[in-house]
Image (tube, rainbow, N blue to C red):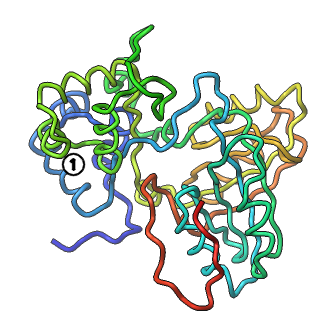
Amino acid sequence: MARESASSVLSLPDQRLVAALQCDGRLTAERAAQVLGLGAAAVRRRLQALGADGTVRVVISPVARPRNGGSAGALFLRIRVLRGKLDTIVAALAAREDIPFIDVTTSGDEIFAVARTEPGSRDHLVFRRLPSTQAVTSLESATILHVFRLTSEWRHQVLTAAEREALRPAGPTPGAAASGAPGPYGVETDAVECSLIDALTPDARLSAVALAARTGHPESTVRRRLAHMAAQGRLVTQVLVDPRRLGLSIEAKFLLQVAPDHLASAGQALADHPSVHGAFATSGPSNLHAAAYFPDLTALYGFLSRDLVGLGITHVETAIVGHAAKRTPLPVPPAPPVPSLPSLPSR
């Protein structure tokens, strides 16, 4: 069977399976079949096919929402470059582990990126390396102050509310805690759980049997620890899929100016909008940043002209994403060295 085009839209049943995985990344084929009214064998076959060709990947989310909604330390970067140097700068940024997300806009000379950093620090990349790079014509940075919506929390709107509720895994157990060193989710973890998280990060659907083989822990221990982490809400998964495969061909970023007395309500309204997959209060003149998926430009116009009305927004700047250059929690290996590339060292 010929492989589907990278930009072809998935069938509705496949889109519903993707949406089911967004509810629970470790969902079994049997449970998905029961809730979606499909045959278990067909679901198992389609899940395997979607994963085998790289259409869908389920990973451990690289960023967990802080318990108070605050930021664990990240900057939004808006970088304008000389048109002939765009690919060069993108490649140099993508090679850095502290840059998990990079988008290139349709303007052809603009990059949006997220940089992990210590809150309040004078980040070396922002204050020294990028400003001194001749290919960079301007640089703006904004600190993330509050998280309203993360990409891992976005849901493709092809399931009913009842289906989403039925697919949602059991929530965290109140007061549950593990022992050991501080982990990536703001709670205590030990060496066993750290090894399980490391193994699950690139493929969150690994079975307990596979995890036992990779980590060397007994299968019974793996199953018990997985159940424990799930009960604490620490197995936060994220489905990586090209939104174009879901019929969402337009991605836009919004830089918004909002009056202080409307900031919280506007941010929450954006977080509740079905198209929005990211919403953050930030420092800088644009104190609210958002990102959203749309099926077409008409839907984008409707969002701007209708959905943003009445939120206290005084200024909107819209940028359309032309290329998502990096959307992965995995370290990206450096590109082969090319003499003309500027050197942006890893932290």
Residue 177, above or below 346 = above
Q: What's the amino acid at mark 1?
A: Leu
Residue position for label 1? 47
Q: Residue furthest left?
A: 41
| Within-10-Å neighbours for mark 1: few <14, some 14–19, many 20+ | some
Residue 288 screen position, x and y as percent: 77, 41
Q: Residue furthest bottom?
A: 339
- Give the residue displayed 33% in from the left and 54% down from the top: 56
Q: Of residues 265 and 179, which is closer to you in this image? A: 179
Residue 48 screen position, x and y as percent: 18, 52
Instruction: Count the marks.
Output: 1
Q: Of residues 128 and 72, which is closer to you in this image? A: 128
Residue 5, above or below 217 = below
Image quadrant of residue 175? top left
Q: Is residue 239 left or right of residue 48?
A: right
Q: Of residues 84 and 271, which is closer to you in this image? A: 84
Residue 316, above or below 227 = below
- Give the residue displayed 58% in from the left and 91% down from the top: 339
Q: Quadrant of the N terminus?
A: bottom left
Residue 166, above or below 331 = above
Q: Is residue 267 left or right of residue 10?
A: right
Q: Quadrant of the C terminus?
A: bottom right
- Give the residue displayed 25% in from the left and 55% down from the top: 51
Mark 1 residue element: helix
Residue 256 screen position, x and y as percent: 81, 46
Residue 37 screen position, x and y as percent: 20, 32
Q: Of residues 23 and 214, which is closer to you in this image? A: 214
